[in-house]
Amino acid sequence: MDLKIENKRVVYPFSVGIDSETGMMDDYDVHIERWLKDITKMFYDENAAIKYLNKHGNIKIYEVYEKGIPEIDGEVRFCSSITYPGKIGDEYFMTKGHFHSRPDTAELYYCIRGHGYMLMERENGDYVIEEMYPGRAVYVPGYYAHRSINIGDEPLISLPVYPGDAGHDYGTIEQKGFKHLVVDKDGKPSIIVNPYYKE
Ligand code: F6R
Ligand code: ZN
């Protein structure tokens, strides 16, 4: 059988290690870090984010390690997604979240460490939240924007797996936000409607 070739690169069989304590991949092509300074606008209480920066300085909110698998139909992309524990105001640290550019594509997250929620929300605001903890797999169907939220006190580490041609649409969430947010209320995670959500 022919090997697939993308950007003059042949995809050979391979395996990779993911450290279950740190989430680090022992062999990766891409490493993305998201620091508070770069994503202050993703938190609904932007003033709280600015106050945090002034008081404590910059902090890493989450990071991703991934292999450079071609973004084409038939491939399966995966990564290690690590969201750190903490809060900005009353909102837990979370990923930016996105729809897939090919909106019908689904995704499976397998949780390796920590305690969190997967927020899944459709464009009409309908939402579902599933709990993430070690050994738990969350299925994110197509047409749902998705965001990992760390509600615990250790890193939330998961292995997301998704179709090669899914792509990422960050713009919709950057403009509108999620309609629902997870915040700490009296020490417990609670779901609120985003006061700044743009219908
Ligand atoms: C891929 C996917 C995950 C996220 C990762 C970081 O489709 O959903 O691999 O990319 O958890 O979150 P974002 O992409 O929202 O910054
Ligand atoms: Zn995704």
Image (tube, rainbow, N blue to C red):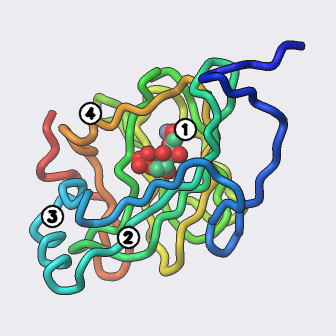
Disc 1 element: strand
Disc 3 element: loop
Disc 2 element: strand
Any mark on residue 198, and which? none
What's the distance in space between the residues labelled 2 and 4, CA to CA? 23 Å
Height in image: 146 above or below 73?
Answer: below
What's the distance in space between the residues labelled 3 and 4, CA to CA? 19 Å
- The answer to whether residue 187 of the structure is visible from this angle is yes
What's the distance in space between the residues labelled 4 and 1, CA to CA? 18 Å
Q: Is mark 4 within 8 Å of ligand 1?
A: no
- The answer to whether residue 119 of the structure is visible from this angle is no
Binning the other alpha carbons within 10 Å of mark 1 as few (below 14), some (14 to 19) or many (20 upward) gives many
Name which of mark 3 and mark 2 comes first in the sequence.
Answer: 3
Q: Quadrant of the C terminus?
A: top left
Disc 4 element: helix
Amino acid tagged 2: Lys
Location of residue 164 (image quadrant): top right
Which residue corresponds to mark 1?
140
Which residue corresponds to mark 2?
60
